[in-house]
Amino acid sequence: MKTVAQKIKDAITRKGFGTVKECAQVLGLPYELLRKVVGEDHIPKDEQLLVYAKKLGIEPKDLLFTAYHQKAPSDFKEYFEKKLIRETPAHYNKVPVLTWVQAGGFASGSDKYPYPGVAEEYVETDLQSKYLFAMRVKGDSMEPLFREGEVVIIDPEIQPQPGDYVIIKNDTEEEATFKQLKKYRGVWVMHPLNPKYEDHEMTKEMRVLGKVVRKQMDF
């Protein structure tokens, strides 16, 4: 299991910051404390962890659990791992959060399962479709409806229709992409919601990996 420091480092990189100082300045976080957390593996109080989770797009429950597990005496770590990680209510699914490279690693239309690699993060959902996976929104092309760091859940078993939000794989590129699917006069088009980006026609190298069926939100 990754430490609090490692998860925060990953989130800083995912947000596109080059240094801890830059991250602290842009997001309004105390630099010295953030440097201590990342560099010295210091575990701050729960209130500060929740701030980091919100600012960096980390699942709050996951970051808190990691901190508790890290601080727990060795005799209790097994309890955390067996009782808290693995036990999920029967009516909930644990859905793997894939990276954009992992999603882009699907080699063909039928190559959906098992998912490539091992997910380092999971989210819980009451959706019951068998092959669900999740992803964190990257970039601003789908703003204002979808913002960077938000989690979307994808169902690869649903046949997408014009107007659906979908994950698209281009066989010539390493990463998958997230767009709205549209159709004009028989031509399929990838449409970004942010008006500063242009539409692009779907080519024969592109295919839909799944339809976005939910955006996970924290309240």
Image (cartoon, rainbow, N blue to C red):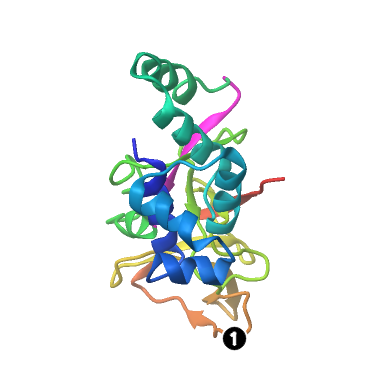
Q: Residues within 10 Å of mark 1 (few under 14, many from 20)?
A: few
Taking 144 as reference, is 142 left or right? left
Q: Is residue 85 above or below residue 49?
A: above
58 or 72, nearer to the observer? 72
**Where residue 109 appears, x then y in whole percent?**
35, 54
The residue that mark 1 highlights is 196
Residue at left offset 45%, top offset 41%: 43
133 or 170, nearer to the observer? 133
**Where residue 107 appears, x then y in whole percent?**
27, 56
134 or 213, nearer to the observer? 134
**Where residue 197 appears, x then y in whole percent?**
55, 84
Q: Is residue 63 above or below residue 187?
A: above
- Farthest-out residue, front: 32
Element assignment for label 1: loop
Residue at left offset 49%, top offset 65%: 138
Taking 143 as reference, is 219 left or right? right
Q: What is the three-letter code of the residue carrying label 1?
A: Lys
Q: Tell me where residue 128 sits by quadrant.
A: top right
Q: Which residues are magenta?
A: 90-99
Residue at left offset 57%, top offset 66%: 27
109 drawn magenta = no
Q: Is residue 67 visible?
A: yes
**Where residue 7 appears, x then y in whole percent?**
40, 48
Q: Which part of the image, by quadrant, shows the N terminus?
A: top left
Q: Tell me where residue 203 sits by quadrant.
A: bottom left
Q: Tell me where residue 164 sits by quadrant.
A: bottom right
98 drawn magenta = yes
Q: Which part of the image, by quadrant, shows the C terminus?
A: top right
Q: Main secondary structure of the magenta part?
A: strand
